[in-house]
Amino acid sequence: MKRFEIITEEVARDLEPGSTVELTRDGQVTPLARDTLSARRVTVVRQGELGADELTRAATREIRVVAVGADHTGLDLKREVLAHLRSRGLTARDLGTHSSDRVDYPDVAADVARAVARGDADAGVVIDGAGVGSAVAANKITGIRAVMATEPLVARYAREHVGVNVLTLGATLVDARRAAEVVDAWLSAAMGEARYLRRVAKIQRLEQPGAAGSGRSGR
């Protein structure tokens, strides 16, 4: 990971979008650089604030490839979401379903979640009737943090605070316009504070066998 004593606007412009960098204990970020870092979704962590394990396991990646799936109730909205993602210049992979025949949302959610967990996609979108069931199913896959959102603010918080990598939508709750707004808010956000990375690392540790104990601390 790159480490800096000072991050200027020029330095910030050269950083890879969606990356995480370290600032020395007494390091500084110039005011103009802060705006550029935010626009490029770069996370800056103060030296010593997080352990290497937390940084490695909790950092979110830049979204370039999105896996998209839907059950039969979300088929029409899936087409709209795919078109919207592609209009943004992203690679959108259609994982089905491809007909109006009934399918079970847990199967679709698992396909999308596994694609993200394997690294075949940077993130995923799953659409069913309400979006709730698909979120529950996707969260059963190790490494997945899925949230259902009907409002752009919820989608933004989901990525900023929790690093959500699978977004679920309810075809009976949002139309194509609102779905695009929710997706855009989610795609445009990034985790920018060390406290969020630390908390996501704790969430990920809960996936490990025997992780039922508690150790409460927070800042």
Image (tube, rainbow, N blue to C red):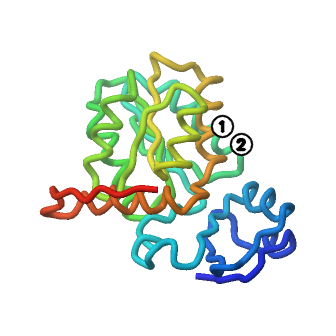
Specify the amino acid type for callout 1: His
Whole-number angstrom distance, CA of label 1 to CA of label 2? 5 Å
Q: Mark 1 sits on what residue? A: 84
Q: Is residue 184 above or below residue 124?
A: above
Residue at 47% of width from left, 72% of height from top?
50
Q: Is residue 123 above or below residue 16?
A: above
Q: Position of residue 31 (x, y in %)?
A: 84, 61
103 horizontally vs 198: left or right: left
Q: Position of residue 93 (x, y in %)?
A: 51, 49
User: Which quadrant: the N terminus?
Assistant: bottom right
Residue at 18% of width from left, 60% of height from top?
211
Residue at 44% of width from left, 62% of height from top?
198
Q: Position of residue 192 (x, y in %)?
A: 61, 58
41 horizontally vs 124: left or right: right
Q: Mark 2 sits on what residue? A: 87
Numbered label attached to residue 127: none
Q: Are marks 1 and 2 in contact (CB under 8 Å)?
A: yes
Per the image, label 1 sits on a secondary structure element best described as helix
Residue at 81% of width from left, 76% of height from top?
11
Front one among 127 and 195? 195
